[in-house]
Amino acid sequence: MFHHQRDICTNVICTLITMWMTSFKVLGWVVNRGPLVRPLDAVQFVAVYAFPITPTNICQEALSVKANGANGDDSQGKAKAEVWRQGGRLAESTGGYWVSVRNFAGKILAAIVTVYVLTSHPGCPEIVKSFLYGFGLYSVLGMIMDGPAALATSAIGMQIAPHFDNPYTAHSLAEFWNKRWNLTAGNLLRFLVYDPINEGRLIHDPTVSVARSKSRRLVGMSMSFVVSGIMHEIMVLYLAHRFSGHMMTYFLCQPVVLVAEQVVKGQLKKHGMDMPVPIGWIYTVGGEVWLSHQFFFGGIFRDVGIPARFCANMADTGAQLSSVSKAVAGPVLSTLGSVGSLWWWAGPEL
């Protein structure tokens, strides 16, 4: 359907949605986990399955039950904290139709600016390119999620959980991965990898209470990054017809740096100190940019060139859309001008 080299943007997006997200949703459904196990009508089921979105009402029932069963003025806050502990940010909403539309437009603008900078300044330092690749990835992924989120909230009345939340403002690695970066993929990894390891069973049974140990949480977190690395490597293999290894290395580094962060913060807490926010932001954003430069984008850029081809494809698509819009707008504006001139000339008689 699409040219393998020329239409790399479409191939990347379709591969992400069909090979990863929809497959994981179906696998989760089979083992009674994930967004498809909720009571959805036929239209909602198809939308949740086909689009890169997660309905926020996945945890709303648990939230209301916990809030109603709690006592005190802060019962809702405690209930939300407990639901977040069990299900991440699934108890939250993106904010509705207009917020999704605004975010969608903002991501389009950010992607255009990023592609323009990359294509007009090909000689900029490689680490700057890696930062721009990451920001462009954030913009494109957010764009393909904000659009369906706006459609889902307006057409079928479904509230959508956040998928990105200003990841470049994170001041810790845990915050970056748990609360801000690609939560749609993170939720699927939670449902299908992290939770089964924590519970000690593949098929979810909501009636059974499970004690989650620290060792299980560590293994679950590590395996989530391993599975994510495998899926990224499969995507690279499909797009480039060769195994990279850089993606897996990047994701294998994440459990190590996350554990190191916890150890350092634990030592600081023993001495009555907290990690200063500016320092947390510097090592979080700076560390992820450096790791992505070394393994994620740097590796692909040197060996396969997917990010550069992606940007070139987006620039070419933008140029084609611009020429089409000019070709369409020219006759329309000319016709409107003729009608306006005729109205101005014959107006007094009419």
Image: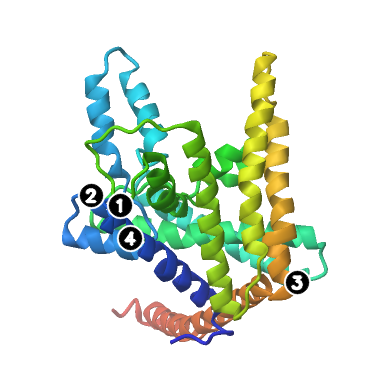
Q: Amino acid at mark 3?
A: Arg
Point 27% across, 55% down: residue: 36
Q: What element does badge 2 sit on?
A: loop
Q: Residues within 10 Å of mark 4 (few under 14, many from 20)?
A: some
Where disc 1 sits, the SS reads helix
Instruction: Work out which quarter of the rendered image holds the N terminus and state it.
Output: bottom left
Q: Earlier in the sequence, mark 2 or mark 3?
A: 2
Select label 3 or label 4 by which is in front.
4
Q: Report if the CB atoms under discs 1 and 2 are less than 8 Å apart.
A: yes
Left or right of 326 on screen, residue 92: left
Left or right placement of residue 257 versus residue 159 in this view: right
- Asked where in the image residue 226 lies, by quadrant, the reply is bottom right
Distance from label 2 to label 3 (Cα)? 44 Å
Residues packed near mark 2 inside 10 Å, few (<14), some (14 to 19) or many (20 plus): some
* Marks 2/4: CA–CA distance: 14 Å
Which residue lies under the disc numbered 3? 302
Q: In which quarter of the view is residue 125 placed?
A: bottom right
| Residue positioned 59% across, 81% down in the render | 241
**Is 96 located above or below residue 19 in the figure?**
above
Who is closer to the viewer here, 41 or 105? 41
* Earlier-in-chain disc, 2 versus 4: 4
Residue type beneath disc 4: Leu
Sequence-wise, which precedes: disc 3 or disc 1? 1
Q: Quadrant of residue 79?
A: top left
For discs 2 and 4, the disc positioned in front in the rendered view: 4
* Image quarter (top left, top right, bottom left or bottom right) of the C terminus: bottom left
Residue 116 appears at what percent x and percent y?
Answer: 68, 68
Q: Which residue is mark 1?
A: 35
- Amino acid type at mark 2: Arg
Report if residue 318 is visible in the image. Answer: no
Residue pointed to by mark 4: 27
The residue where tag 2 is placed is 38
